[in-house]
Image (cartoon, rainbow, N blue to C red):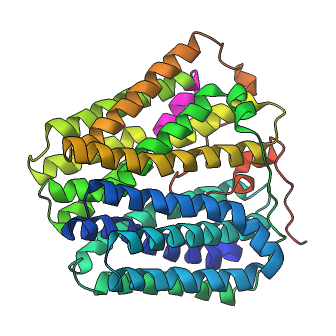
């Protein structure tokens, strides 16, 4: 396994540094904004701004690569992304933070896509599964590490912003020193959302629900925890517990979905995510340890929904281009992630902190009902048509052609030299 990962070790290190820095910013900024009395809606708009930039980065990066090349574009985006945390510390206010968060989203999406296209170049049909699984493990692990870096210092001080900047800056070093040849330009495969919905209504609705609910969670949960009276270290544990729960639940839910109609698994996961969100409402202001356990359960039931929805869509896609399907799902998830934090911010302004998990409970309950409805409208695909479940995070733009299923379902062939 070491020999398999050695050619991509530098690239995995780069994405680890990027995600650690971004994970730290994702918790630091809502906590600091709450301390600065931004207001729930302002914090929600900040969360949405990140995903607006994220979607823009996914769309623009292939064009920018063709114009400037991988190395120059990577260096430019790292430079901008490392400056932004420092600007956050210097320009404290809602409007500057909205604009800066959009810049971060655009740069980080572009950086992830560049690194992931590089990983795809080095992956072969024989080792793609190992590379993808390692990449997913790195994602979950370093996002958790990013939350725990909140323990290093007080969010009111400059140091955590500097640390986020340092981590993003260091991500340029492994890529700059790698001996791997630059990959070919990223291709943009498009599929109309209307056609994608006809292919798999539950899959599209599932990734949209993930965007709405989890986008709201990432944008607002640190503020929710702060308003619930948790200290900064407890907020870090609250956020980390959610990520760890989501990571541990990927394979159990995946294996369950391989053995039954995936829509039934999606319905079960959504129903339990709704229950865990309601639990967080009922235990609000209780002991921090109890809230952290409830956050863990929320991650267990809500975070696997993205991979389950992608797997179900791929089961239904048949002859539709795999990369186009994945691109359409990523766009759908991004749209939901833009809208979700704003709605959650309005709910928190109207109903207080409990509005966040009231919103996520409604989203998951609606999705559970829709999955049940669709099960009565169309039969599940035959077993021989189902592809094996592949765990994946919904926290970074995983390239479709890095997914090992691409070799089986019409994704682009591996272009590795030799």
Quarter occupied by residue 172: bottom right
Residue at figure coordinates x 84%, y 70% from the top left: 184
Residue drawn at point x = 71 percent, y = 57 percent: 402
Closer to the camera in the image, 93 or 296: 93
Q: Residue at x 30, y 64 (%)?
A: 30
x and y percentages locating residue 70 in the rendered image: 75, 78
Q: Residue furthest top?
A: 376
230 relative position to 96: left or right: left
Looking at the image, is 14 positioned above or below residue 125? Answer: below
Q: Image quadrant for the N terminus?
A: bottom right
Q: Which residues are magenta?
A: 252-262
**Residue 121 in the figure: left or right of residue 347:** right
Q: Main secondary structure of the magenta part?
A: helix
Expressed as whole percent of the image width and height from the top left, the position of residue 187 reads: 82, 60
The image shows residue 121 at horizontal and vertical percentages of 79, 67
| Residue at the extreme front of the image, as rendered | 95
**Camera-nearest residue between 322 and 9:** 322
Q: Nearer the viewer, residue 391 or 196?
A: 196
Q: Residue at x 52, y 21 (%)?
A: 371
**Residue 260 colored in magenta in the image:** yes
Name the side, left or right, on which 323 lies relative to 247: right
The picture quadrant where one finds residue 146 is bottom left
Residue 39 appears in the picture as rendered: yes
- For residue 238, say whether it is visible: no
- Figure label count: 0
Q: Quadrant of residue 64?
A: bottom right
Which part of the image, by quadrant, shows the C terminus?
bottom right
x, y percentage for residue 22?
Answer: 45, 70
Query: Does 370 appear above or below 389?
Result: above
Residue 98 belongs to magenta span = no
């Amino acid at each position: 396994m070491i020999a398999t990962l050695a050619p991509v070790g530098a690239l995995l290190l780069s994405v680890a540094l990027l995600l650690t820095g971004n994970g730290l910013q994702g918790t630091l900024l809502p906590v600091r904004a709450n301390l600065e009395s931004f207001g729930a809606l302002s914090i929600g708009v900040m969360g949405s701004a990140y995903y607006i930039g994220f979607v823009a980065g996914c769309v623009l990066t292939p064009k920018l690569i063709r114009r400037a090349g991988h190395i120059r574009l990577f260096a430019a985006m790292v430079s901008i992304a490392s400056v932004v945390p420092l600007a956050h510390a210097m320009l404290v206010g809602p409007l500057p933070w909205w604009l800066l968060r959009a810049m971060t989203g655009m740069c980080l999406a572009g950086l992830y896509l560049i690194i992931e296209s590089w990983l795809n170049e080095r992956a072969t049909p024989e080792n793609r599964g190992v590379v993808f699984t390692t990449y997913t493990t790195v994602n979950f692990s370093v996002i958790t590490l990013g939350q725990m870096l909140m323990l290093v210092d007080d969010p009111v001080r400059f140091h955590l912003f500097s640390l986020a900047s340092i981590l993003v800056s260091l991500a340029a070093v492994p890529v700059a020193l790698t001996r791997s040849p630059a990959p070919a330009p990223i291709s943009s495969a498009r599929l109309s959302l209307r056609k994608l919905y006809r292919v798999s209504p539950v899959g599209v609705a599932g990734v949209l629900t993930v965007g709405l609910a989890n986008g709201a969670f990432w944008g607002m949960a640190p503020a929710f925890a702060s308003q619930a009276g948790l200290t900064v270290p407890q907020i870090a544990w609250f956020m980390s517990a959610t990520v760890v729960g989501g990571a541990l639940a990927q394979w159990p839910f995946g294996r369950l979905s391989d053995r039954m109609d995936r829509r039934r698994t999606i319905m079960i996961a959504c129903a339990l995510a709704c229950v865990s969100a309601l639990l967080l409402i009922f235990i609000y202001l209780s002991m921090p340890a109890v809230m952290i356990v409830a956050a863990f359960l929320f991650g267990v039931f809500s975070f696997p929904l993205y991979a389950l929805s992608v797997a179900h869509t791929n089961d239904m896609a048949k002859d539709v281009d795999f990369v186009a399907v994945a691109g359409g799902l990523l766009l759908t998830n991004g749209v939901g992630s833009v809208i979700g934090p704003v709605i959650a911010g309005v709910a928190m302004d109207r109903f207080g902190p409990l509005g966040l998990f009231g919103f996520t409970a409604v989203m998951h309950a609606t999705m559970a009902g829709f999955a049940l409805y669709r099960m009565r409208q169309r039969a599940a695909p035959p077993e021989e048509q189902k592809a094996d479940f592949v765990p994946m995070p919904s926290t970074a733009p995983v390239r479709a052609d890095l997914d090992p299923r691409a070799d089986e379902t019409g994704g682009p062939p591996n272009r590795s030299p030799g």
